[in-house]
Image (tube, rainbow, N blue to C red):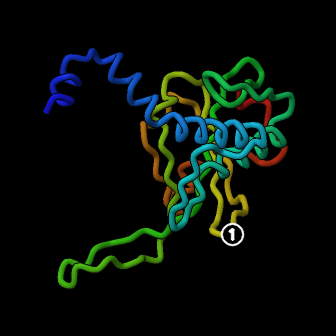
Amino acid sequence: MWVYYRDMALTNSEKCKRYYESHKDKFRKYQRIKRAKIRDKIPVSIRSAKNNTFGTDGLEGEKIALSILPESVHIHRPCDLFWKGKFIDVKTSKKMSTTMIDYKTGKSIALKTFRWKFILSRQKGKVDFFLLICKNQDNKVEHIFLIPDKDLPNNLSIAESNIPKFEKYRLIPTIDPHLI
């Protein structure tokens, strides 16, 4: 009982100091692992999903973008690339099948249509262009689009049937200078 009252009298900073002291070894081990991953250029937080390898697709997309866009420079803030005076953010997505829920059985059914999903809300308004790299399920690049920021919503889903709508933004490995 006495310990409870004594802890209630502590300020928040004192409670934080005590918590850190009691968990110091765990914090130090985590920081040591994190520094080693950063040094070896391994993504610190990796989530794996059924169709996605989060953390590595973005790095691969940036390498593809650097090879496609001549004279581009890799930067960290506020976006991925700086090219001909424009800020470009690179987004990579792997083709996913569309699912539908059968309400009679409650099971989800994979349809034969495929789409690429891009979440653009964090960089919307901070960049001039988005370079969208659409990969197939074997991680091969199918489509590359360079789309102005003003022409996109916060979240974009491109179905295979909607590809003709984006033809004017498509990049071929040799860039057309009139795009910028």
The C terminus sits in image quarter: top right
Position of 134 with respect to 111 (left or right) is right
Position of 176 with respect to 164 (left or right) is right
Q: Is residue 25 visible?
A: yes
Q: Height in image: 3 above or below 30?
A: above
From this viewpoint, which residue is outermost toward the bottom? Answer: 105
Q: Quadrant of residue 127?
A: top right
Position of 52 with respect to 36 (left or right) is left
**Rendered residue at 68%/26% (across/down):** 76
**Rendered residue at 84%/42% (across/down):** 67
**Rendered residue at 48%/28% (across/down):** 124
**What amino acid type should be assigned to the residue bearing mark 1?**
Asp
Q: Identify residue for label 1.
A: 138
Q: How many marks?
A: 1
Q: Height in image: 106 above or below 45?
A: below
Q: Nearer the viewer, residue 138 or 162?
A: 138
Q: Mark 1: few, some, or many residues within 10 Å (few <14, many ≥20)?
A: few
Q: Nearer the viewer, residue 172 or 115?
A: 115
The N terminus sits in image quarter: top left
Q: Height in image: 22 above or below 156?
A: above
Q: Position of residue 80 (x, y in %)?
A: 67, 31
Q: Position of residue 142 (x, y in %)?
A: 69, 60
Which element is circle 1 on? loop
Q: Position of residue 138 (x, y in %)?
A: 68, 69
Q: Is residue 169 visible?
A: no
**Rendered residue at 51%/47% (across/down):** 118
Q: Nearer the viewer, residue 138 or 14?
A: 14
Position of 15 with respect to 175 (left or right) is left
